[in-house]
Amino acid sequence: NFFRGRIMLRAKVLTKVLVQANTNGVHGALLLTEEGSLMATTGEDEKQVVIAAIVSNVFTQFQRLRNSSDNLEWLLFDCKEGRVVVTRVGVLLLCLYSDTTAEFGMLKAKANVLRDYLKEPLSQVAM
């Protein structure tokens, strides 16, 4: 059976988990594929597709520059309108984006908590 052993992602549940990070300057959280396809999102709808495209592109380029056997664990960058933190959760990327008032340490801590919480359930997802 094709579906045996596969887990279905529930977008509503993922969104409820991700939205908990949207405090203290954090405007949104994205769970996306390395190709930029959004799996779950919170925050400002009009920006999410653009942020996902930029994040996937930058993450993929940095990953290519590194040793292919050495996975990039964190990517943090400053933009004109805010800050972005990206980390890998299984085969997906987790991204938090904020305004410039949010400190990188707080963003990374929030992303780390989400990553640890989502790691086990998302490890069972076949993409």
Image (cartoon, rainbow, N blue to C red):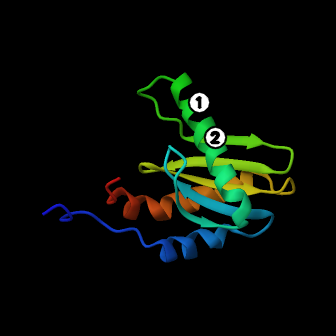
Rendered-image quadrant of the N terminus: bottom left
Q: Secondary structure at mark 1?
A: helix
Measured as percent of width and height from the top left, residue 45 is found at: 69, 65
Q: Would residue 108 be visible to someone looking at this image?
A: no
Q: Amino acid at mark 1?
A: Phe
Work out whether residue 92 or residue 54 is closer to the camera in this orientation and state it.
Answer: 54
Of all residues, the one furthest to the left in this rendering is 1
Q: Amino acid at mark 2?
A: Leu
Work out whether residue 105 or residue 124 is closer to the camera in this orientation and state it.
Answer: 124
On the image, numbered disc 2 is attached to which residue? 75
For the residues labelled 2 and 1, say whether their Cβ atoms are less than 8 Å apart. Answer: yes
- Nearest to the eye among marks 2 and 1: give it: 1
Task: Give neighbour class at mark 2: few <14, some 14-19, many 20+ (Cα, 10 Å).
Answer: some
On the image, numbered disc 1 is attached to which residue? 62
Give the left or right position of residue 6, taking residue 58 as reference: left
Task: Give neighbour class at mark 1: few <14, some 14-19, many 20+ (Cα, 10 Å).
Answer: some
Work out whether residue 43 or residue 101 is closer to the camera in this orientation and state it.
Answer: 43
Quarter residue 55 falls in: top right
| Distance between mark 2 and mark 1 Cα atoms | 9 Å
Quarter residue 126 falls in: bottom left
* Total numbered labels: 2
- Which residue is drawn at the image coordinates 18% and 65% (left, top)? 4
- Which residue is drawn at the image coordinates 46% and 63% (left, top)? 118
- Which residue is drawn at the image coordinates 38% and 61% (left, top)? 120
- Tag 1 or tag 2, which sits nearer the N-term? 1
Give the left or right position of residue 12, taking residue 62 as reference: left
In the picture, the disc for residue 123 is: none
